[in-house]
Amino acid sequence: MIRDLGVQNGRFSLEVWRPDEAERERASRPDRAEAMKQTHSNTATAAYEKWFREQVQESLDDPRPNLQHAQVQKEMADKKAALRKRIEAGGA
């Protein structure tokens, strides 16, 4: 089994390994469990999916012409350069 994990050699101490004690009691955190359920509930997932689909559709329906990636990169580089220049001049 060790080779199946990709371990070719090593030293292992089994002094404290007690496989019969593997089923340990874990502290229950009902507050966190409930928070996780709320975060990942079907309602939250459905709301996010609805919002996401609306955003995609809005983009598809946008009548403005599409921009080439290189053009957007150049525009952003120009904006960043102008901002850096303003910062260096002492006024953000």
Image (cartoon, grey):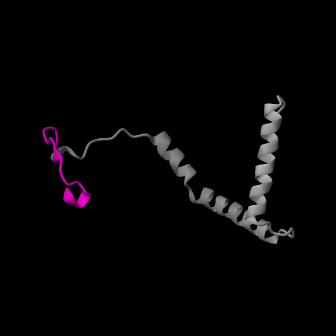
Q: Tell me where residue 39 appears, x and y as whole percent.
A: 57, 50
Instruction: State the quadrant of the N terminus.
Output: bottom left
Residue at left offset 76%, top offset 69% = 57
Residue at left offset 78%, top offset 44% = 81
Residue 45 falls left or right of residue 65: left
Residue at left offset 82%, top offset 43% = 82
- Tell me where the magenta segment starts and ends, as one range: 1-19
Q: Where 17 falls versus 70 (above or below)?
A: above
Q: Tell me where residue 25 appears, x and y as whole percent.
A: 29, 41
- Is 55 or 49 nearer to us in this picture? 55
- Is 34 or 36 nearer to us in this picture? 36
Residue at left offset 53%, top offset 45% = 35
Q: Where 70 falls versus 38 (above or below)?
A: below
Inspect the magenta stretch and tell me whether residue 74 lies in it.
no
Residue 21 falls left or right of residue 86: left
Q: Tell me where residue 83 appears, x and y as whole percent.
A: 80, 40
Q: Tell me where residue 56 appears, x and y as whole percent.
A: 73, 66
Residue 8 falls left or right of residue 39: left
- Is 25 or 70 nearer to us in this picture? 70
